[in-house]
Image: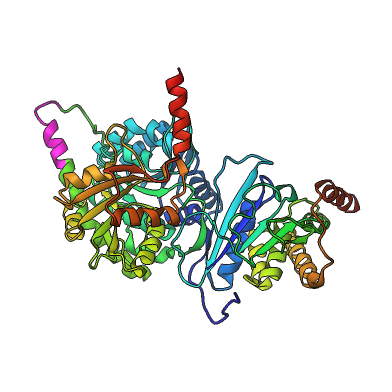
Amino acid sequence: MRPDRTFIPLGRPLEGSRAVAETVARCRPQVVPAYPISPQTHIVEGISSLIRSGELEHCEFVTVESEFGAMSLCIGASATGSRTYTATSSQGLLFMAEALYNAAGLGLPIVMTVANRALGAPINIWNDQSDSLSQRDSGWIQLYARDNQAACDLHPIAFRLAEELSVPVMVCMDGFILTHAVERLDVPEPGVVDEYLPPYAPCQVLDPDAPLSIGAMVGPEAFTEVRYLAHHRMEAAIQRFPELAGRYAKLVGRRAEDLARGYRLEGARTVFVAMGSVVGTLEDAIDEAREQGLSVGAVELTCFRPFPAARLRDLLADAEHIVVLERALSTGLGGILTAELAAARAGEGRQRTTVVAGLGGRPVTRKALRTLIADAMARRLPPLSFLDLDHTLLRRAHTKENGR
Amino acid sequence: MYQIRVHGRGGQGVVTAAELIAWAAIYDGHYALAFPSFGSERTGAPVEAYCRIADTPIRSREPVDAPDAVLVLDATLLHRPGTFKGLKAGGLALVNSAASVAVPEAPQLLAVPATRIALARTGRALPNVPMLGAFAAASGAVSLEAVHTAVELRFAGPLARVNRDGADDAYGYMTEAESETEAVEFDVPAAFAAEREARHAA
């Protein structure tokens, strides 16, 4: 393969984490409290180095003692009027859990990258989406990136959305698969981000000169109403996200991010639903299946919270069989996304099948997807299955348990 | 799509090798995607990294299972099962070794003394950049100019120059060695002895 010299490349080679760090820096956060944890570490290291080199000015990077400290500091910084950012993964996110709910309850527009990683025990540093999905009821908007360009582009949109709605936003990107991948990426120009994202203008600020209290006790007389308002505030993102994403896409000249998006849905009888980095491999597998005349398509979900029920009902309206690829497991239930689709009445009355794939870093290969597509088309899939399950290993485990 | 799998041991710059191939391919105007196999990073443990090069955006993020090229940064991994797994017929197999070697899984195996070149040029036994130069020569998948650009942007100051020289030496070695002497059956102790000699010579 000889290079074509006439081709002018767009973007430059960057690691996903570095590109996210540079994009976040262009959003001009003022406070970044962070604690390192794999696979997120390169992101906050990148931001730290951008502050040290002077490329990111007027920003305080705070090395904290824990993730609980990181999110608590985010709450303080955001409540005093600073644009605030942090990043974490896995057990780090769980350690933040209490503060996550407080950040959302207080309506603080914090933006956080979650480099998705499995939860222990057993300890596992590799990718799945159990961590962020475990916090789906925390009151944070959750956006999932299909690739590193999306991971970058979702951050300016996340800050804009968070500050407009007073709701914190998690941008979730698959750990290692995206964070540690080097590819050609476009980091938006500082002028572009400045045009898109005005300086943070908080509607309420903690100020020692004008003391007030936030998050004070609310009893049974008003707590339901507080939650009702929070629910409706977050639901506004269903309208605002596509609009803000569209405006950003015009500025950078790329395809706009959307709540959810269909891929080759025309005449598709079997439709796969997925979130995150598996979407690229899935689309390649679908192209291959289409070439063989199989009527298969995909729906990529970017916005998991708020859950775009109406959009998903539209996208899945013509599907006969829906196969949900899940990179997490609700033990004792099965697929988290499948349950949400059912609650949203997306694809109602049609067969819905859950396939748990890619737990704890197991690669989701084109070969496995090829077999899965064939099984799905032949209606051979049980309601819940696990992709590439190692039956020899399971038999060994069963024998050991029975022998006890 | 041109796919590369890099094998080596933790500390030899395996991940950087795959990344630099991607950098070079991108400077050549291609799309490229490089990523490691994400093991727990331990010095000396076998490590894999992957790189894909294409002229259209690369969507697939699965590990490379049918490589067009396999680069082995540590000759002790030659007989490890899976090192040449899925290598396409007529694909490139390149090992870091001062001695000419042969393995049944990859009869086309080419050797380049990457550690010896690295020691001579940089004073450090990091074979990855010379392997990159050798890969450019043997595959044509990336240009030497793009390798220079990648190395100069990756390393700072004098380190950039000596690494660039290392890439050039390996590139030259491969282009001159096209009518190479016939390979001998791989002999680990002999290869180690050759490496040791090279180290003493350096």
Q: Quadrant of the C terminus of chain A?
A: top left
Q: Which residues are magenta?
A: A219-229
Task: Specify whether residue A70 is painted magenta.
Answer: no
Q: Quadrant of the N terminus of chain A?
A: bottom right
Residue drawn where x is 40% and y is 63% of the image: A284
Q: Nearer the viewer, residue A84 or A152?
A: A152
Task: Residue A42: give x, y in percent of width and height.
Answer: 52, 47
Q: Is residue A12 above or below residue A216?
A: below
Q: How is the image coloured?
A: rainbow
Residue drawn where x is 48% and y is 42% of the image: A126
Residue B134 in the figure: left or right of residue A191: right
Residue drawn where x is 37% and y is 66% of the image: A287
Task: Residue B39: give x, y in percent of width and height.
Answer: 56, 43
Please tell me how many numbered marks the rendered image carries: 0
Task: Residue A60: give x, y in percent of width and height.
Answer: 46, 44
Q: Nearer the viewer, residue B32 or B90?
A: B90
Q: Nearer the viewer, residue A97 or A71?
A: A97
Q: Residue furthest top?
A: A404
Residue drawn where x is 71% and y is 65% of the image: B133
Q: Is residue B156 above or below residue A104?
A: below
Q: Main secondary structure of the magenta part?
A: helix
Q: Residue furthest left?
A: A221
Task: Specify whether residue A223 is painted magenta.
Answer: yes
Task: Residue A394: give x, y in percent of width and height.
Answer: 44, 33
Residue B81 appears in the figure: yes
Residue A348 in the figure: left or right of residue A252: left
Residue A27 appears in the figure: no
Residue A96 in the figure: left or right of residue B65: left
